[in-house]
Amino acid sequence: MTSTEIKLIDTHTHLYLDRFDDDREKMMVRCFESGIDTMLLPNINLESVPRVLDMMMKWPNACYGMMGLHPCYVKEDWEKELESIMARLDSPPEGFDFVAVGEIGLDLYWDKKFKTEQSQAFLTQVGMAKERGLPIVIHVRDAWNELFTLMDQVNDDNLRGVFHCFTGGLKEATRALDYGGFLLGIGGVSTYKNGGLDKVLPSIPLESLVLETDSPYLSPAPHRGKRNESSYLIHIAKKVAEIKGVSLEEVASVTNEIAVRMFGLKVK
Ligand SMILES: [Zn+2]
């Protein structure tokens, strides 16, 4: 099997953003040619909702949407915005389903002003995911302790999901996986020299990992610094294979199976 025959699932990619408006069709062709045949699109705010829907309908066999309010967009009026987003979650276009509530979480890196509101929005969205039997996709930046405190309150057998763009240490990885229903999303940081994941991943079973690009951010080496796109996922898969000391084929088959199960995707 050559690497071009490897199929991979990008579990977190914002291909609907305006960064791709000029060349989205060509970019999607590059993704398909690179074996990236499934892309999960996390919503960020009310404005991005129609963009996520457009891609789901244009590429129904490849693009799956999520609905949620990203912590960086939680402001004074978060309840109103979330209400509109969740109305959409409950009324997907005919024949479609959303695969997760995401992305949600805490981000105290950019702005601490709405810390309380971020926590409230997170807990509200966790409740909505539980009611609907959907997984959650968690974004956490500079807020591990705060997030774990919230997770300790709400975790139960009905809650499952992904800690997306995982960049914590072994302590955080262990605590996240101890919740029982959670996976770590591994992205471009795994390819960075001082990314630190080479020290964490050897202790984590492959069965606890899914792959993601988080496009257009965090391009993996050798594309670091440029706009990221889902076709670059192959570099992340190769790095994970190298760190884990397993074949690329094994990384692909295990992480694909885990992603299909977590998000209830169609098996291709
Ligand atoms: Zn994201």
Image (cartoon, rainbow, N blue to C red):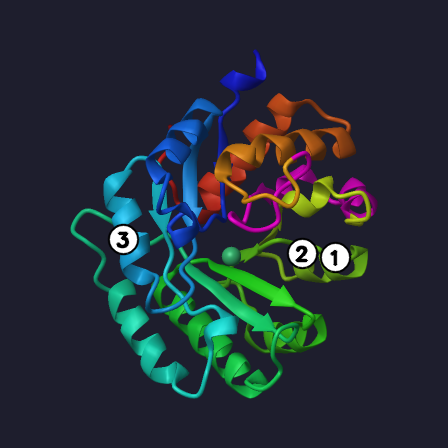
Q: Position of residue 148 (x, y in %)?
A: 66, 72
Is 157 placed above or below 183 here? Answer: below
Considering depth in this image, is 222 or 129 the residue closer to the camera? 222
The residue carrying mark 1 is: 174
Measured Cα–Cα span from mark 1 to mark 3? 35 Å
Q: Amino acid at mark 2?
A: Leu
Crowding near the residue tagged with mark 2, few <14, some 14–19, many ≥20 C-alpha atoms within 10 Å? some
- 115 in relation to 211, above or below: below
Q: Earlier in the sequence, mark 1 or mark 3?
A: 3
Q: Which residues are magenta?
A: 197-222
How many discs appear?
A: 3
The N terminus sits in image quarter: top right
- Residue 132 appears in the figure: yes
Residue 210 included in the magenta stretch of the image: yes
Residue position marked by numbered label 2 in the rendering: 177
Disc 3, SS: helix
Q: CA distance from mark 3 to mark 2?
A: 31 Å
46 is higher (above) or lower (below) than 160: below
Q: Is mark 1 within 8 Å of ligand 1?
A: no
Residue 234 image point, x, y percent: 58, 30
Closer to the chain start, of discs 3 and 2, is 3
The magenta stretch spans residue 125:
no
Tag of residue 106: none
Tag 1 near tag 2, CB within 8 Å: yes
**Residue 17 seen anywhere in this rendered image of the structure:** no
For the point 44% across and 31% down, the residue is 31
Residue tagged 3: 53
Front of the two marks 1 and 3:
3
